[in-house]
Image (spheres, rainbow, N blue to C red):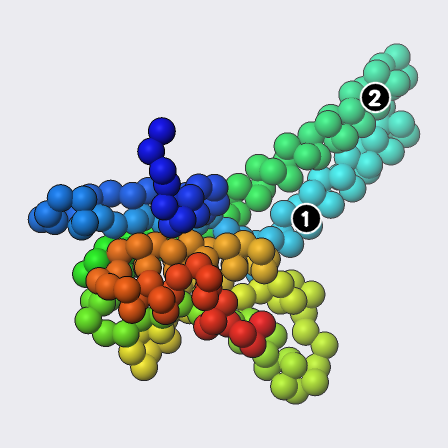
């Protein structure tokens, strides 16, 4: 079994990452990475919990109605069936809603470009311009903190994943959950360093400096 570099070890697990050969490259040096993170936005994450709550209360209401107005000969059987379906189906329903409400942004990193693929098409950024990845709290959360207001509950774990492209700030994803947001930031920094042109890039964006752009968190 061959030895794995620290960057290759970091490619395992979430988010899904695929290494590919860049067309026109020479040997194994010209390689790129395709990162496909599935994540929840600040509104989608609590939406699954709300839908499960509706599911449970709907089952409770159906059980009460069946006890009051169900057929006398099968009232107990139907009530037990509805209650069992409500309890056993709550977790699969919750997982299905989380999957259906998930978002995805495809990010390809090569030695020449960083490409972002979304619902509205493809955006390509050349690496001749300085590029860096940062993590910021949601802008509405920052505004609430500045105004000394109580932030909405779904915004307390919301983060913007931002790519600095020269003097431009490009929001790549809005993610609910600090752990996943930081994991995606680490993965982008690792892939960016692994495809960098030289040691200077690796020193700036290596895993040991993965939070250098987000010390304010």
Q: Percent from the top left, x then y, of residue 73?
A: 88, 12
Which of the image's four quarters has the C terminus? bottom right
With respect to residue 197, does 89 lie above or below? above
Q: Could one spot residue 43 in this view of the protein?
A: no
Of callouts 2 and 1, the N-terminal one: 1
Q: Nearer the viewer, residue 148 or 210?
A: 210
Q: Percent from the top left, x then y, of residue 84?
A: 78, 24
Judged from this view, the residue extending furthest toward the bottom is 147
Q: Percent from the top left, x then y, of residue 1?
A: 36, 29
Q: Nearer the viewer, residue 146 or 91?
A: 146
Q: Percent from the top left, x then y, of residue 168?
A: 33, 78
With respect to residue 155, does 7 lie above or below? above
Q: Could one spot residue 153 in this view of the protein?
A: yes
Query: Which residue corresponds to mark 2?
Result: 80
Q: Is residue 13 left or right of residue 84?
A: left
Q: Is residue 30 left or right of residue 158?
A: left
Q: Nearer the viewer, residue 152 or 130?
A: 130
Where residue 216 sits, quadrant-wise, is bottom right
Where residue 12 sits, quadrant-wise, is top left
Please name the residue shown 22% across and 62% down the image.
197
Please name the residue shown 60% across and 53% down the image.
45
| Disc marking residue 69 | none
With respect to residue 133, does 73 lie above or below? above
Q: Is residue 52 left or right of residue 178?
A: right
Please name the residue shown 83% across and 31% down the image.
63
Query: Which residue corresponds to mark 1?
Result: 49
Question: Which of the two discs, 2 and 1, sits closer to the camera?
Answer: 1
């Amino acid at each position: 079994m061959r030895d794995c570099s620290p960057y290759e070890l970091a490619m395992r697990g979430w988010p899904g990452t695929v290494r590919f050969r860049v067309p026109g490259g020479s040997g194994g040096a010209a390689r790129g990475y395709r990162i496909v993170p599935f994540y929840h936005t600040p509104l989608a994450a609590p939406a699954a919990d709300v839908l499960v709550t509706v599911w449970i209360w709907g089952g409770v209401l159906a059980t009460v109605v069946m006890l009051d107005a169900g057929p006398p000969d099968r009232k107990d059987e139907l009530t037990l069936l509805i209650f069992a379906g409500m309890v056993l189906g709550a977790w699969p329903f919750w997982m299905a809603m989380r999957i259906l409400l998930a978002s995805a942004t495809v990010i390809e990193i090569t030695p020449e470009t960083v490409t972002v693929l979304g619902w509205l098409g493809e955006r390509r950024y050349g690496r001749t311009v300085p590029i860096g990845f940062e993590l910021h709290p949601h802008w509405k959360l920052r505004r609430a903190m500045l105004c000394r207001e109580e932030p909405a509950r779904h915004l307390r774990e919301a983060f913007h994943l931002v790519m600095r492209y020269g003097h431009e700030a490009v929001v790549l994803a809005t993610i609910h959950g600090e752990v996943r947001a930081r994991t995606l930031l680490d993965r982008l920094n690792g892939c960016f360093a692994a495809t960098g042109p030289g040691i200077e890039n690796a020193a700036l964006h290596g895993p040991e400096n993965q939070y250098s752009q987000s010390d304010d968190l």
